[in-house]
Amino acid sequence: MSREIEKIKYCSAGHSSEDFAYPYCRNLIHSVGLCDFCTKEHFIQEFKNWSSGNTNIDKIMQESQIKNRYNKLHWIPYDNFQNIEYIADCDYGSVYSAKLENGIKWKWNFIKQDWRYRLKDFKVALKEIKNSRYDIVRVINNYNCIDYGISKNPSTQNYIFVMDLLDGSLHNFLTKNFWGLEWQSKMDILSSIASLLCFSHEKNLVHCNLHSGNILMNYNFDILDLVIDSGLCKLEDNLILNSNNKNNQIYGSIPYLPPEVLRGNEFTRKGDVYSFSGIMYEIVTAKRPFTDQAHDTYLMIDICNGVRPKVSDFMLNLIPEWYLNLMYRCWSDDPSERPTSIELSNLFCEITDKLQDNIFDNNVMRQLKIADENHEHTSNPQKQELLEFFSYSSKLHPESCYISKCIHTLYGLHDLLEEIKSGKSSDPNILKSNESTTLNADT
Ligand SMILES: [Zn+2]
């Protein structure tokens, strides 16, 4: 028989509902035995029972348990994971799925004098951090990117982030669903990415490695929730302080890197906007930028000379003109001509709202309506032609690479450029054939 839940003024330990258990949150006490204050005190009592082996990481987790009512980070012992299955390799290491056998501690029950657990038998993603470039303490500290907690693989001693299990990357999603996507979904996706970018940029964080392969989707066939993996994020203030330094090498995927970065300059917020354009391109063409070319030093020189991915003529009546203009503006060679992430976020938010309410009151909205109608009215032979073109054009060039890797900038290659062009020197940016099979297999 369920017991009626009512708020009460005092718990059995004497805490009052007038107290503040967490900043700005009055203590919630329920007659079933729940009290924020008791929960917090018991979390503090448990501090002596666990450790990650790193006092900085312990401190961050402890603080999250003291300060947040909801977003607590837990130390999750590795033996809590069952049915561990490998999913994929990523920039930072490997991702696995697993079941949380015992769940995680949620609230202390002062009547039962025991913990209430949540997420028992729940499937989660484990991100094992193998890449030593990944500064774990900084990532945990700066970003709200870990959903549940942290663990450690006892055999490798690598730390593990315990996260929501996502349905794969945006690129995989688009490959599977492109032909069924209406503008509403396309705008939803772009609006989510732009607002996440805007959120980071407001904190002066630059993503530095935005591409459709590292935007993860929590996908329920109608709900789109995007998570950006922030392993390479940098603070723009730090970058600008170092702006006299030119980089010999950078990390990323050439088609998404802005020309100024390929030349050796620092990555700024406007660089993220350039990378965003590659995502805008894929959302309307089903292709990633420069699929049919080798991703080598020649392509870097072309990009610096203003070459950008093209949209096939026969797709043009399916894409609003303003969209193409905006996409090429994000791809401007001059960063100051690119829009800000706030502009992008505001625009896509407004469009998704209007699409939801069927408001077509301006040119932007009217063009979207026409594009959707043209898509509907595309005849079957035309669709067949599009599909054939799509399967042809989605074939990857054997020397393309959409996984982030170390790239020598044009600044770093300066003395070698003439020799590379004349064939006297081999191009250090070209993918060796054995590398390409492994790298492209993941994408
Ligand atoms: Zn209490």
Image (cartoon, helix red, strand yellow):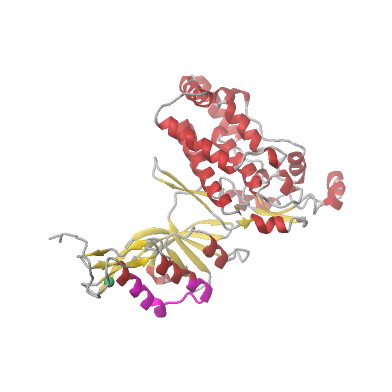
Q: Position of residue 307 (x, y in %)?
A: 73, 35
Pick out the residue farthest to the left: 1
Figure check: 308 above or below 398: above
Image quarter where the N terminus lies is: bottom left
Figure check: 345 above or below 91: above
- Please give left or right for residue 274 compared with residue 419 in the image: left
Q: Position of residue 41 (x, y in %)?
A: 34, 74
- Please give left or right for residue 250 compared with residue 389 in the image: right
Question: What residue is rendered at 40% in x and 43% in y?
Answer: 223
Q: Position of residue 186 (x, y in %)?
A: 49, 35
Number of labelled discs? 0
- Ligand 1 found in image quarter: bottom left
Question: What residue is rendered at 49% in x and 69% in y?
Answer: 60
Q: Which residues are magenta?
A: 40-59
Q: Main secondary structure of the magenta part?
A: helix
Question: Is there any visible trace of residue 405 in the rendered image?
Answer: yes
Question: What residue is rendered at 39% in x and 40% in y?
Answer: 222
Figure check: 393 above or below 88: above
Q: Is residue 56 magenta?
A: yes
Question: Is there any visible trace of residue 54 in the rendered image?
Answer: no
In which quarter of the view is residue 255 placed? Answer: top right
Q: Is residue 6 magenta?
A: no
Q: Position of residue 262 (x, y in %)?
A: 73, 48
